[in-house]
Image (cartoon, rainbow, N blue to C red):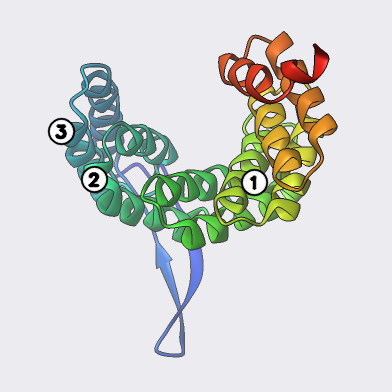
Amino acid sequence: MKKYIFAFIAFACLQFDVHCQEIYSITEEGRNNIIELTDGARVLIQEKKANQAVTQLLEAIRIDSVFREAYLVLYQAGALNTENTIKVISGLEKGLRIFQEDDELHFYCGELHRLNSDLEKALIDYNYAIMYAKANGEDFYLVPYYYFNRGNCYLKMRNEQLALEDYNYSLKLKPDFSAALMNRGVCFFKIGKKSEACQDWKNALDQGSEQAKSYYEKHCQKDLK
């Protein structure tokens, strides 16, 4: 049977201090099979069958580890049901050994670590996502969320100053980001800057944030009476 090479990726790795190289290839039939598995997993996700979707996608990645779309859908399945977090992260990390400077994949790993309450590991992946986004381009629609969710980690870790910096940059990239306004207001309130907090909550409220409405009514409206 004639073999059609659909993907050929080589990368260097260090294993026992030996410089090695892995080469990936896939037949036309194999690639079509991967696409079917990935599309089928999307349907399973829509049906809320996360466990089946994860199993199917991990099989797809085992067969063809350079089909990037499978990793993106794998994250969706992992975010749907955190019971699979460890397996999904392992799958995504396999992708990162191939797509080494992929800021989106690093962000998704960070998201799963955060959902699993492992903030230290989440920060590592968010840091990589942000670093590679600087090189790959910050016009990608998810980049404001890289900073926003890293800021959320810092906020949970009670490092309000670093959280503020991330919310500021997130808002620079996405000025209408009401969730960033909401959480930046929380940071301001925690460090004693109530007027700034109220202004952020008011702006977020004007954008329709119900959470900001609760904070504004509790902490700010009484001062206006």
The amino acid on which the numbered mark 3 sits, given as a three-letter code, is Gln
The amino acid on which the numbered mark 1 sits, given as a three-letter code, is Gly
**Distance between mark 1 and mark 2 Cα atoms:** 25 Å
Residue shown at the point (45%, 52%) measured from the top left: 8
Mark 1 and mark 3 residues within 8 Å of each other at the beta carbon: no
Q: Earlier in the sequence, mark 1 or mark 3?
A: 3
Q: Name the residue that disc number 2 marks.
A: 84
**Distance between mark 3 and mark 2 Cα atoms:** 10 Å
Observer-nearest of 111 and 38: 111
The residue sitting at the front extreme is 225
Name which quarter of the figure residue 33 lies in.
top left
Residue shown at the point (59%, 18%) measured from the top left: 214
Q: Is residue 116 left or right of residue 220?
A: left
Q: In terms of secondary structure, where does tag 3 sit?
A: helix
Image mark count: 3
Q: In terms of secondary structure, where does tag 2 sit?
A: helix
Q: Is residue 21 left or right of residue 184?
A: left
Residue 45 sits above or below residue 167 on the image = above
Q: In x, y percent, where is residue 202?
A: 76, 17
Q: Name the residue that disc number 3 marks.
A: 52
Residue shown at the point (83%, 32%) measured from the top left: 196
Residue 1 appears in the picture as rendered: no
* Residue 151 circle label: 1
Observer-nearest of 214 and 168: 214
Observer-nearest of 105 and 222: 222
Q: In x, y percent, where is residue 159?
A: 66, 57
Q: In x, y percent, where is residue 68?
A: 44, 41
The amino acid on which the numbered mark 2 sits, given as a three-letter code, is Asn
Determine crowd level at label 1: few under 14, some 14-19, many 20+ residues with C-alpha closer than 10 A.
Answer: many
